[in-house]
Every structure is written in structure tokens, then in C-alpha cells.
Image (tube, rainbow, N blue to C red):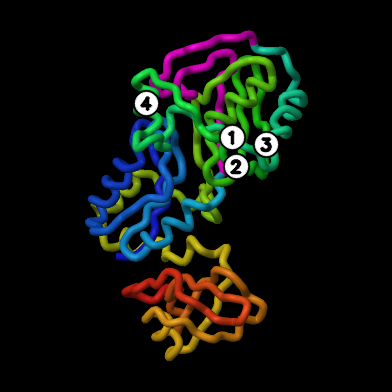
Amino acid sequence: MDGLLLLNKPPGMTSNRALQTVRRLLNARKAGHTGSLDPSATGMLPLCFGEATKVCAYLLDADKTYRVTARLGEATSTGDADGGEVIATAEVPELTFEEWNDILQGFVGESMQVPPMYSALKKDGKRLYELARQGETVERAPRPIRIDRIELLEAAGTRLVFRVSCSKGTYVRTLVEDVARRAGTVAHTVRLHRESVGDFKSSDMIDLATVEADAEQDREALRAGLLPPDEALVSMEAIDVGAADGLKFSGGQALQVAADGKKGLVRVYGAGKQFLGVGEISGDGVLAPRRVFQLQEKTP
């Protein structure tokens, strides 16, 4: 069983618990997910099974889109409403929709962001959230992030709703706090829903209740309906190699290919359009294996 399932993670569940629940329903031996969502957050959580776990690293690096709801005028210790206590309050300025939009657009582009204390990053071998729960605050180095687009959806009273498309490593909770600070107030995230990961969109997601019902009715059909691993890599160019070269590639050997201008990471297909893995083409037309897949069935 090799494939991906795009779970619409429900609130109140850790990403790992969601993974293990679906893994048990599918009776899968090997499984992984591609980037945690906070327990209170909802939305797209790509789950990978079998050989598809090899694409996890590529999806971790993928851009994401979130729908964000913030409450203005209150800051919490965690930056969200998930168990954090209110640590500061402030008046909310009476700004127009256009003024709020101008503030949001000021965050589009590349910048440096300081990660929150309540995060899974490590300091001297300890998770930052573990230190934060002990009342400690440590210095965190700012990290580069990129925000491609922000769309303001609602600005009314203490409620601010927007959609943001951003690079990996972007902490939306911190973005909400920074937006409020620029407006002269404080805020925290009350709802976070991930709408997309890479090229996967909301329409591809499946609810956990549906997975449970489908697994009970016909587990094999559910397993057969998993997305093929190369669906996660469509942003890469594709290259076809012959049957003989396909065997060499699968055996870890580099090939001389007609690159036709292709360079960098590519999807590699062998005889019968069988997906073989990810390779990297150098300037001299050499295709070197980077991730070799041993799929049991051919993918379209």
C-alpha cells in the first residue's frame, strides 16, 4: 500500500493521533505526516503510507495557505486560544477595511520572523514549549519567511479574518501578533484552518468520519483510492527513461540523458509510465537518483 491521503484534520486532535488513527483504519505498516498542525487547528494534513513516506520531505518544504481568524484586543501566552491565558489587553483602533488591508499588505514579501516560545523548535535539546510551560523565555534567532499573498476577508470590531499563502516555517500565530502590533493593539489566533499544501487543494481533502465509514465498509477500496506518491511532486518537471535505464536508475546508478533544458530535481518515469522516483539533472545532462521508489503497482 503506497499512497497519500489528504486528511481534513478535526479540532482537538494532535497530528500524530490523527495519523495513527488513519494508519490503524488502513492497517498500514509504514506511515508519516508532512508537517504538524496545532491540536486546535483544522485542515489539510497530508498522510503518507508505504513508499509514499519518501515524499514527506518535499511536502514539508511546500508552501501553505491558511484561513485565519484573530481576536483583537487580547494577547495570550500561547498566541492562540488553545489553553493560553490572557496576558495583555489593549484598545482596538477603529480602522476601516481598507486601513486593515493596507496593514496586512505590508507583510507581503520576504522578512525575518522570531519563532514563538510555544513551538516545537529546540533549544539545548529541549522543546521551546517545554521551557515555556516552566515559565522560561529564551532568546530565539529570527528566521527567514516569505508571504506571497494576504487576502483580508473580514474586519469587524475585535474580529479579523484573512487568508495567507506563505512559505514553510511561517508561524501564523506570530504573524497575527505582528499585525496587531503594527495596528497599535494586541491579538491572538482563535481559529486556524489549512486550506492547501503545495499543489493540493481543499477539494482533495477527506474528513476523518468519512475515512472511518469507508474503512468499515470496504478497507481495500479505500486503500486503492489513495493518491499516488508522484501527485505530491507535480511542481517538478518529468522525464522518461527507457526500460534498461529505468532498471539502472532504480538500482541507484546515474544516467546520461537528453535533458532538453531540464535541470535540478525531476520526476523520473520508466517503461509504461511507471514512477521510479526523484532524480537530479546536472548541467552536463547526468541524471542522478535522489529518491528511488519501489512501487508495487504502476501509477497513471
Mark nearer the N terminus (1 vs 4) = 1
Q: CA distance from mark 4 to mark 2?
A: 23 Å
Residue contact at pointers 1 and 3, CB within 8 angstroms: no
Residue assigned mark 4? 131
Mark sitting on residue 128: none
What percent of the width, then of the height, locates residue 278? 47, 70
**What amino acid does circle 1 point to?**
Gln
- Whether residue 161 is situated above or below residue 251 in the rendered picture: above
Residue holding disc 2: 144
Look at the picture and state if 43 lies above or below 181.
below
Are circles 1 and 2 on residues that touch, CB within 8 Å? Answer: yes
Q: Closer to us: mark 2 or mark 3?
A: 2
Q: What secondary structure is marked by label 3?
A: strand
Q: Which amino acid type corresponds to the residue marked 2 in the rendered image?
A: Pro
Report the residue at 61% width, 81% height from top: 284
Q: Residues within 10 Å of mark 2 (few under 14, many from 20)?
A: some
Query: Magenta segment, which residues?
Result: 65-91
Q: Is residue 175 above or below residue 43?
A: above
- Of badges 3 and 4, the one in the foreground is 4
Mark 3 to mark 4: distance in Å?
A: 35 Å
Q: Mark 1 to mark 2: distance in Å?
A: 6 Å
Task: List x then y, in percent, for residue 132.
Answer: 39, 23
Give the residue drawn at x 63%, y 43%.
146
- Per the image, the residue denoted by label 1 is 113
Q: CA distance from mark 2 to mark 3?
A: 21 Å
| Badge 1 element | strand
| Nearest to N terminus: mark 2 or mark 3 | 2
Dot 4 or dot 2, earlier in sequence: 4
**Residue 72 within the segment the image draws in magenta:** yes
* In front of the other: 247 or 116: 116
Give the residue type that dot 4 points to.
Answer: Leu
